[in-house]
Image (cartoon, rainbow, N blue to C red):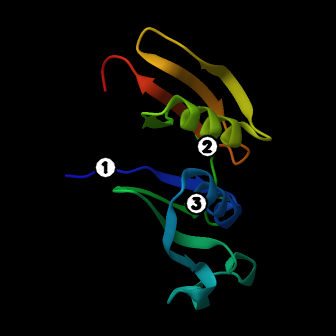
Amino acid sequence: MKLNPYLAFDGRCREAFEFYEKTLGGRITFIQTIGESPMASDMPTEAHGRVMHVTLEIGDQVLQGADAPPGQFTTPAGFCVAMHVDDVAEGERIFSALAQNGKVQMALQPTFWAKGFGMLIDQFGTPWIVNAGQVIGS
């Protein structure tokens, strides 16, 4: 079994994933809008530019997402995307980029389990945890 986050957006999925691609050093391997899909004729014209599905590969990990149909988006709650990097400087770079125009909940700082740990909600509404230079656990 393999688990991966699947993120929902309210019309900003493409923008978010292009940002994640650049920030996390990944590669978008698939993206399709509702208008490009076989279901386009069944959807309102204003929904055609919304992303129906996107896949971002980051090393051997996958992050996926889509725009919710118009009027069906709900704000994410009760989860976060956790990332673990070995290099503290890389963790600081990623945390700083994700924090741009977002909300830092806990600044990146040393803890007993990692040389750097921080929490934030990015400008797209996605909650993140960044662990860098992990000391204990996994």
Counting residues from the start of the chain, the first of labels 1 and 3 encountered is 1
State the separation of the CA atoms marked 3 and 2: 15 Å
**Secondary structure beneath disc 2?**
loop
Label 1 amino acid? Leu
Label 3 amino acid? Glu
State the separation of the CA atoms marked 1 and 3: 19 Å
State the separation of the CA atoms marked 2 and 1: 18 Å
Label 2 amino acid? Thr
Left or right of 36, for residue 1: left
The spot of residue 138 in percent (x, y) is 31, 27
Q: Quadrant location of residue 120? A: top right
Location of mark 2 (residue): 126
The spot of residue 115 in percent (x, y) is 49, 18
Q: Quadrant location of residue 62? A: bottom left
Residue 50 showing in the rendered view:
yes
- What number of labels is visible? 3
Location of mark 3 (residue): 21
The spot of residue 94 in percent (x, y) is 61, 40
Location of mark 1 (residue): 3
Q: Residue at x 60, y 71 (%)?
A: 51
Give the farthest residue toward the left: 1
Q: Residues within 10 Å of mark 2 (few under 14, many from 20)?
A: many
